[in-house]
Amino acid sequence: MTRQHRHALRIFRTALKAADPVEAVRRSLRLHGNTLMVGARRYYLGSFERILVVGAGKAGATMASAVEHVLGRRITAGLINTKYQHTARLRRIELNECGHPVPDENGVAGARRIAELARGAGPHDLVLCLISGGASALMPLPAGPITLEEKQQVTRLLLRSGANIHEINAVRKHLSAIKGGQLARLAAPATVVALMLSDVIGDDLDVIGSGPTAPDASTFQRARSILAKYALMDQAPAAVIERLRAGEAGLIPETPKAGEALFHRVQNVVVGSNRLAVNAAALQARQLGYRPLVLSTLVEGETREIARMHAAIAREVKLSGRPVKPPACILSGGETTVTVKGDGKGGRNQEFALAAAIELAGVDAVTVLSAGTDGTDGPTDAAGAIADGETLARARKLDLEAVRHLAENNAYPFFDALGDLVCTGPTGTNVMDVMLVLVGCPA
């Protein structure tokens, strides 16, 4: 492992630490005597008969552990849906492990119980809702008569189409009985406080976890237009198309919108985000001797094109010292998309590293790392991958053809053979991806 590789991994680990959900929750949820402070608001716990904790997400277990640390025995009951193996030791809140990114029956069973807890809340109850990345898939409650299998089919179609997270969630919300503000509707007239660990571009409340406690800006018409945009109208199940058309015609109630009375007793707070993680990474890079440059924490688009753009910037830095002089650390965050055309194994971060490696072949003193802060990249056990100007030369010695692996969306075995996968295991957090390029090395 080169010095640059070690530095890149250290910078990424710093980003992970900054996104730690336990610290994020503790920053926003503070108890002073019998007064609970959430952001700038105060809640006198003596006025509540019960405190219920519900939610979903890959960071749900760790967020719940932080809530237990703050509130302890004051918690009456709770249930969190989390991804398989993304667990923590809890005493008052129950964990329900289920499928992601494609929802499964365990997720439906847990979502049904979460809905029942919310529906049973009264005007003197406090409902804490913990939402983090993956919550859309992990809290599935299909609106009848749509079945789980039909919702799974739509999810797979959207994931493979190249649709972004905003588009996918707009469809999910209108096929659900709990998303798009509908959990808040179920809990009314209880007081609802939602703590959100953002995994979406721009930290939009109605997009994080498909916004179960936030006013929904999307509509049935928007959901149907997204399926049409990606030519999925003929592939989606008939029940899905029928529901979207019925909603568009006003035959089914829309999701709750801004200004509705039910949101008067709802507080939504973003407790952690990609921006916080990238800022911490930039500080670590500076401490290691690099000049950090944050391009954006709002990056989205086709993975390969974004990777090529980062590689081009690295070459410009090396050639002319623009837009920053070496040794430099170019950082960005967000969530790109992959239009799947092959049947290989990989994820968007591994594909990013492979596409960048092809563009940087033979360029010395440049290292690229792209990884997901949740520790998983697509349906793999790796968070991402690391590459440099020597990656393709090393691959050829193992008879690995980089261009073919990229064409087949098969980055995982490519980097696995080279020993260049970034493997962290489940991190307990999820604030999208961190992409970094190191150009030059400090003396």
Image (tube, rainbow, N blue to C red):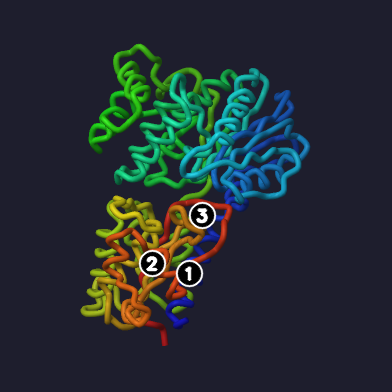
Q: Label 3 sits on what residue type?
A: Asp
Q: Position of residue 27 (x, y in %)?
A: 60, 49
Which residue in the protein does label 1 denote?
Answer: 11
> Foreground: 223 or 339?
339
Horizontal arrangement in the rendering, residue 377 relative to residue 314 (left or right): right
Q: Label 2 sits on what residue type?
A: Leu
Q: Position of residue 266 (x, y in %)?
A: 53, 27
Residue 384 falls in which quadrant of the image? bottom left
The C terminus is located in which quarter?
Answer: bottom left
Which residue in the protein does label 2 denote?
Answer: 436
| Residue found at x 23% / y 36% | 231
Q: Position of residue 409 (x, y in %)?
A: 33, 58
Query: Is residue 12 visible in the rendered structure shown here?
Result: yes
Between disc 3 and disc 2, the foreground one is 3
Q: Label 1 sits on what residue type?
A: Ile
Q: SS of the residue at dot 3?
A: loop
